[in-house]
Image (cartoon, rainbow, N blue to C red):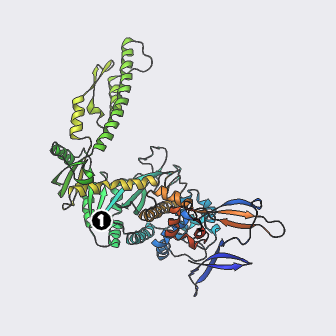
Amino acid sequence: MHIFEREIKGRRYRIAATTVRVAGRKHPVSRQVSLGPVESDEAFMPSQCEVAGFRRVGDVGALIEVAEELGVLDAFAAVAPSDGVSPGLGEVLLAVALQRVCAPGAKRDLPEFLGAALPRFSVLRNDLFTGQAFHRLTRNVSEEVYEKVQIAIAKRACELYRLKTDVLAYDTTNFDTFISTTTSSELAQRGHAKSKRADLKVVGLALMTSATHSVPLFHRPYAGNESDKTVLADTLGTLARLHEALGPADRTVVRDGGFAGTQLELALGESGYHSVSVLALSAKTAREALAAAVGKIEPLPGKLRDVGAWRSRVTTDGFDRTIVVVESPELLKGQLRGLSLAMKRARRELRKIAGRLDEERAGSARGRRYTATSLRRRVEKLTRREHVREVLRVEIGGDEKRPTLSVTYDAAAKRRLVRERLGKRVLLTDQHEWSTEQIVKAFRSQWKVERAFRRMKRGAVSPWGPSYQWTDDSLRAHTFATVLGLQLATLVRLKLQRAGVCRSTKGCLKLLSGIRLTRLVARPPGLGGPREILVAPRLDRDARRATDIFRFDRWTPLLSATRDAGARPRRKQS
């Protein structure tokens, strides 16, 4: 996009121009759009001016700058070219991604959102970016199109921002939808909702991020009732293509215990990936490792000195694997707190049941009476929380019609749990050459993909919901735009962090959102209509550095004329 100035009726305006190749035409089409006046050429009294709103510059401009570096629109043009007259698929999805980060809302508000922003990625009219255009362009777009674009963007991001891809974190989550039960959908299904909303259909999301800076590199939406193991197996083909695009290297996928299986291990190896996974403590291999590690756990050196580990080499399901038992004081503290709360609730309910049984024996109880069978079902439900049944000893005596209940606390069983199981994880990997510290650090990178999920929840950086999409095509496109917005926002934070400006993504977006122009409408007396005047804000040191990093001056020269808010003018020496 080329930006220049032009004088129109005595005032200078900033013009953005670009050329678009249209199918069926020999020569490209040139399009121009005005970015507003350069500066005010007249002085007006404050009584003649009124504030008419703001024009976004910082947050939208930074995201567009990163999107241009990654070649988002070029990646879409290679697989889904537009007609040059109306917005293309890439332009609409980029507009939705900007909206999800800066001002999450309905897609019918896209024209208003784009009209309030000074930076532009397209010179087409803002009223063309409508919800109808979104649904029309995303209809019948295959997953292969989105995957090709993702791989192209991920490759470009790793090259430009020097992202380390030797360790990649992989995990899944799901989001609530408001699709009716009678509406047919392949993606929206009833499954195990993370939000505990059993009345809503959910859409699953598999996400892979870099271990450094947690930048999303690949994602795929899937049916809400599909298992994690099946999802990972279905995406191995795309992961193999991503591995080839990033170049030959030794890469390791970090995954949790839900992604386990003999066939999956074979397929991961064929795709060129190593793996680090955590075993369920109920698995036979994990139980044997925990028993063997008792009294042999030693602290790790360096920053992980508070963490203990024991390492061995085993053969499980025909695979030669390195197994590491990790003991974490923080994990132990959290598990003991959860166990204490669960036991407190269970003992409170059991005391109520015991009082009810006493009333039944005394003949003063009303309503339905407990039987030994119903009492056993109730006790199993109250103590089904992990480890509660091992610490609280509940005995049911008496006969079928007049049962008795006794509850005792087993302190020795709790001490045995702390010594053998609590606060421990069992890791399994095929990276035999790695040190124990490397294996533990790689596993700890799993929380970065979980942090990316938190940023996509409601009220975060790029929220997925609330989503009111009714078709699978729009759900895929909406998910792609949400992840793209998170990717752009993460890279914006990375650029500012490397410049020493700020560290958190929310802090960077808050800083950038303050870089905006105030729109004043001046109504001078006499002839002539109202005049629009853009007033620049006072920029502090961090805002000035962000202006230089993302080149906001190309959108408006007013920002270059501002002075640091913290700088004081020098006195003239006599």
Q: Residue furthest right?
A: 526
**Quarter holding the N terminus?**
bottom right
Residue 54 vs 364, above or below: the answer is: below
Residue 386 or 361: which is nearer the viewer? 386
Residue 528 or 361: which is nearer the viewer? 528
Where residue 93 sits: x, y (%)? 52, 66
**Quarter holding the C terminus?**
bottom right
> Is any atom of residue 187 visible in this view?
yes
Where residue 63 sits: x, y (%)? 51, 66
Q: Is residue 241 left or right of residue 439?
A: right
Q: Which residue shows up at 41% across the image and 51% down it?
A: 225
Residue 317 or 36: which is nearer the viewer? 36
The amino acid beneath tag 1 is Asp
Residue 448 or 543: which is nearer the viewer? 543
Q: Secondary structure at mark 1?
A: loop
Where residue 66 sits: x, y (%)? 48, 69
**Mark 1, other Cα within 10 Å: few <14 / some 14–19 / many ≥20:** some
Q: Residue furthest front?
A: 574
Residue 111 vs 437, above or below: the answer is: below
Q: Quadrant of residue 231?
A: bottom left
Mark 1 sits on what residue? 166
Total marks in image:
1
Where residue 238 sits: x, y (%)? 36, 67
Q: Residue furthest bottom?
A: 26
> Is any atom of residue 138 visible in this view?
no
Q: Quadrant of residue 441?
A: bottom left
Residue 181 vs 120, above or below: the answer is: above
